Image: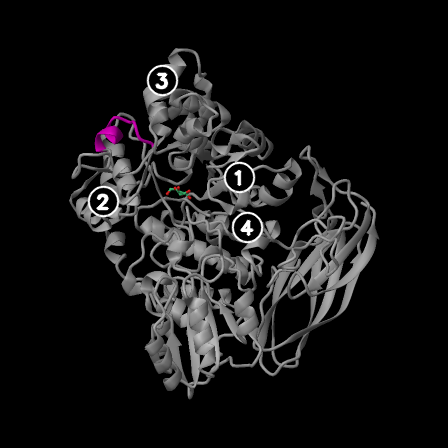
Amino acid sequence: MKLTQAQAEKVEALLREMTLDEKIGQMNLESPSIVGGFDVSFEELIEMVNDGRIPQEEFVKIMSTAKRDFHEDDIRAGRVGAMMGDDPVKANELQKIAVEESRLGIPLMMGFDVIHGFRTVYPIAIAEAGSFEPDLFRRTARMAARESRAHGVNWNFAPMVDVARDARWGRVSEGPGEDPYLASCFARAKIDGLQGDTSSKESYVAACLKHYVAYGACESGRDYNTTTMANSLLYNAYLPPFKAAVEEGAATVMASFNDLNGVPCTLNRFTLREILKECWSFPGFVVSDANAIRECVVHGIAEDEPTAGVMAAQAGMDMDMGTEIYLNNLKQAIEDGRLDVAYLDEAVRRILSVKMWLGLFDNPYVPEEQIATNEVIPQTNLDLALEAGEKSIVLLKNDDNLLPLSKSQKISLVGTLAAKPEEVIGAWAMSWKPSDCVTILDGLKNQGAALEYFPCGGPDAPMNDEEIAAAAAYGDVIVAVVGENVTMTGEASSKADISMPGAQREMLQKLLDTGKPVIALLMNGRPMALEWEAEHLSTLVECWHLGIQMGNAVAKVLFGEAVPQGKLASTFPKMTGQCPIYYNHPNTGRPGSKSKFTSRYLDAGFSELFPFGYGLSYTTFQYDDLAVEDKGDHLAVSVKVTNTGKRSGVETVQLYMQDVVGSIVRPVKELKGFTKVSLEAGASAQVSFTLNKSDMGFYNNDGKYLLEDGTFRIYVGGNSRDCLMQELRLVF
Ligand code: GLC
């Protein structure tokens, strides 16, 4: 996000005109509040539903009569800087009030959660990251930006780039997995996609990096829980994707709910001011997460809301999402001398700069003709969602070569997840339509498969023995779709047990007992503990939540029209108790092994079930002739990859390094590069990497980046476990 000189001068001129009230108004983000229809507050109503005091049906009935307050009067009075919403007609109405009726006519940011697509929903991030294709990350983000703008949304609360190592956390689904390097590539590409095409107002939005920072390290994977870590871990594992995205020009950042080393990120001066704004020179603005300034009182860092507001503003929090604490308290704080107006000027300068960069002062409205065309999803969008789906599917097991299927086989499709449109969508999809969704049942039918569908059971559906018997009687092969409901991942969806929910394991056992071959397709939003499934099933495919084209993507891979090429962006454990589990861990003094006095579990050993970067193909690949040359400022790495199978395939070749001895212990492996290669059966390719020595360092606990001479190991392979290795001494 860069302003021209003229734009920067306009911002300064506007700032000089603004009253104290108008400055504070710009720092206030509202969402349409639910009002009327009941005699308790909306928050109380939610509590009443959650604790069962009123039935869900009663809640829905009340909501149907409730109105929504869009804060028109506040906007007119210059007390709102940004709104949330996804309706272009309403956006134009509110924008018109801001631009034509408020004193200074400052346009609104219109923000919305567009995490993996607006109406054209594509795979959840943990799936898409597994495509290991930055160009794809960028293209899907660009599509989301265009759809957003067409619906009046000029600010996406995305990308979520939280590194996460504990699959008990439900928000693993929303981010790019466990690795800082892959997450950084993902973050950079998403910023370019969302913000990069400023050729026309219709094709870019302000991104919002979230959740800053280390939210994914919430203790025991429990959402909103405390996070505590050494600064070296913060710098080496959790900050990198944010740093990469700020370098790419991210326009806004959302602070995370968690307290980090005792200080909530909402008012954490170290992370917000020292790192983000000073060290990284971040030019945009920081917004709180929903209600987070109020929660600083609950955290116990502020006595009361006015104090929380002052502390947040001083720490570098520029915009308040949803509490009105800034609106109701900052003026008094300024007048009492508890807050310097310079903090407001800084915040408002940043906010106005983003609005100026977005072109909102010249073009605040969605063109009517654009609104008229929103109804139809362009074929190019559908094609891209399909491509992203195909590339995110991970083949975990194919021991009996049941896949790919042939069209002549009769298929018994099993599992409630296979036929529910709402289950393909994934967490945090907000503006989709059920009619757009292609289920796995739809997708197989679209492929002309000979199939019958038997629900048989699901994550929260009881097993049905008659349907299981009928499924066994009909098909030559049983395709069982199992996993998690979409509601089991996303925000506030941590789980203490991430094994297969409900009676699905028993259902799979009964299907196996019929003697018919069983192919299990997983629909889930997090890595799951699948030790039993991996032991009993010969064929296992990770299909995640792939968005509106899910069924077509899965069907094309099942029939071999598309090759499975996805890899895992997060480690899969054998058992929940192994979490957090990740590949880039320190060695410890007693690395896990079969012998007793080593770092392992008596009941789960020490290894993962499926490692980071893992994924099979319908063919096989062999790695030979790893060569590593020291070229002074970089290493030249090359390896020969051969397709040793009978079908063409696509392989993601991965480059890892290990700094064997350091002034603080370093991970046993760190991803430092990847590239995809497509090979016909029998063909080979020489794959090369350039590893800049400047990228081989690490941060110490003072936040200082170090390059230390010593022994290094270079690994190359098709996943983080099975690699060729060369060792060398390096002097920097
Ligand atoms: C939520 C989420 C955040 C989202 C925000 C606005 O609580 O934490 O990711 O952008 O509220 O919906």
User: Mark 3 and 4 residues: CB-CB less than 8 Å, in contact?
Assistant: no
Pair 2/1: label in front: 2
User: Mark 3 and 1 residues: CB-CB less than 8 Å, in contact?
Assistant: no
Image point (28%, 46%), residue name: 366
Give the SS element for disc 2. loop
Q: Position of residue 519 (x, y in %)?
A: 47, 76
Please name the colour scheme applied to the rendered image: one colour
Residue 469 image label: none
Amino acid type, callout 1:
Val
Image point (64%, 37%), residue name: 230
Q: Nearest the camera: 622 or 664? A: 664
Point out the stretch of residues depicted in magenta. 72-81
- In space, the residues marked 4 and 2 are separated at their CA atoms by 35 Å
Image point (19%, 47%), residue name: 58
Residue 117 seen in this snapshot = no
Give the SS element for disc 4. loop
What residue is shown with label 1?
213
What residue is shown with label 3?
331
Pair 4/2: label in front: 2
What residue is shown with label 4?
166
Relative to 107, say whether 389 is above or below: below
Residue 700 seen in this snapshot = yes
- In space, the residues marked 3 and 4 are separated at their CA atoms by 42 Å
Pair 3/2: label in front: 2
Q: Is mark 3 within 8 Å of ligand 1?
A: no
What residue is shown with label 2?
54
Which image quadrant is residue 488 in? bottom left
Among the two numbered marks 2 and 1 on one chain, the one whose residue lies closer to the N terminus: 2
Among the two numbered marks 3 and 4 on one chain, the one whose residue lies closer to the N terminus: 4
Q: Position of residue 106 (x, y in %)?
A: 32, 31
325 horizontally vs 216: left or right: left
Relative to 269, say whether 206 is above or below: below
